Image: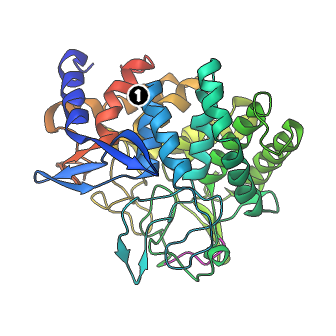
Amino acid sequence: MVNADVIIPRAEDLLNELAVTKSIRGESLDLYNAGIDSGKIRFGLFARDLLISAFMLTREEFLRNVVSFCFSTQGEEADPETGEEPGRVIHEYESVHLRGLITRYNAADTTQLAIIGLESMLANEDDLKFGQKWAGTVKRSLDYLIKHMDNGLFWEDPSFCGAKRYALRSTYWKDDKLPGRENPCYPVAYSLLQAQTVAALRAAARLTEKLDIGYGRGELQKYAGKLVNSMFALLWDDKANYPAIALDQSGLISGISSDGVHMLYYLDVEDVPQKKTDAIFDNSRELITPHGYRTYAPGQPEYAPDSYHLGSIWPFEQYFIASGGVKFGKDFVCDVASRVLQIQAKHGFYELFGWDGDELKPLGCEKQLWSACLPLGMKGCDLLR
């Protein structure tokens, strides 16, 4: 077991280093930059990184600031250059140019995560007032989600913003190349994104008891239930006996990926048929390393242990895999995921690590926000092993 008394103060020190105060539409918000490399800010404000970090840290004031950042910058119109759509939550605050486009709204999951974040904090009267401030924004977020739903799935499609593609090759957290695709053949349904959308719809259904968000509880629960049924019917790869990474217009994008165990964080135990639960945990053993779970199993097309998302180990993801494992009664998953803390204690809070069976390599950004949040989150949720 890692010595929490050593690694946690170091994580807190990095959070202080990453801290930044931004004025967003006239409101001063205390936030964190996403990463530092060679002593300079490499990654600024990212909605996904902030939300994921807030889920791990469970610090109410930080989550409040993150939700304010997300909803204050919510999309208002369709823009094919940035990927903006009405109701879509921002990806990256800075305007970064890539492949002739801008990454600003290139995130298909941040809207869902923002709804989940808001609902999780409405516990007292002050929080309720905060929620009431954003009730109309939540409605626009739900309008956006439901507009993207068809045949029971949430589809990502740049045609909604008037474009043929995005600046990024993929728009969920694994925003690099998918196996077998230079670009998805849009529209595309990502499996992990379906689970996040289920969780967002259920969070919004609970919000209806406190806020007027323009939708009824039963209506939102019905959308969520249909999505659960569809994802395990249409996105299940029978050959691999495992969730596909995605489905696009060219077919299933298959692979034993960490998405299959990561998604369980957002689902309820009763959502997943028992045979498929067993298959997910059995087949995800191919992702196990001495240092935690890989993103993608060896032996598959385009696997590389030092790739960005097709074989590397991402520290932050271990929190969500561990939490899902505990929820589904598989404590060994938490034991495996906790191993990454040992390499963080030795190497620091790198963005990702590569392990080829022999050599371990720190990769990516040298000091990453959600990597630093991992030990704090694991300790806070009693996941340290």
- Secondary structure state at the residue bearing disc 1: helix
Query: In screen coordinates, is 108 left or right of 50?
Result: right
Residue found at the far left of this picture: 38
Nearer-the-camera pick, 187 or 106: 106
Residue 69 to residue 299: above or below: above
Nearer-the-camera pick, 134 or 364: 134
Q: How are the colours assigned in the image?
A: rainbow
Query: In screen coordinates, is 298 left or right of 237?
Result: left
Nearer-the-camera pick, 89 or 366: 89
The residue beneath circle 1 is 57
Indicate whether residue 120 is drawn in magenta.
no
Q: Is residue 343 visible?
A: no
What is the three-letter code of the residue carrying label 1? Leu
Kindly indicate the quadrant of the structure image that contains residue 372.
top left
Report the quarter where the N terminus lies.
top left
The residue positioned 46% from the left and 79% from the top of the image is: 182
| Rendering coords of residue 85 (x, y %) | 62, 67
Kindly indicate the quadrant of the structure image that contains residue 190.
bottom right
Q: Main secondary structure of the magenta part?
A: loop
Query: In screen coordinates, is 193 left or right of 318?
Result: right
The residue positioned 82% from the left and 62% from the top of the image is: 151
Residue 316 to residue 243: above or below: above
The residue positioned 60% from the left and 56% from the top of the image is: 240
| Rendering coords of residue 214 (x, y %) | 82, 45
| Rendering coords of residue 94 (x, y %) | 36, 63
Q: Which residues are magenta?
A: 183-187
Report the quarter where the C terminus lies.
top left
Residue 146 to residue 4: above or below: below
Report crowding for label 1: few under 14, some 14 to 19, many 20 or more residues within 10 A (C-alpha): many
Image mark count:
1
Query: In screen coordinates, is 275 left or right of 216?
Result: left
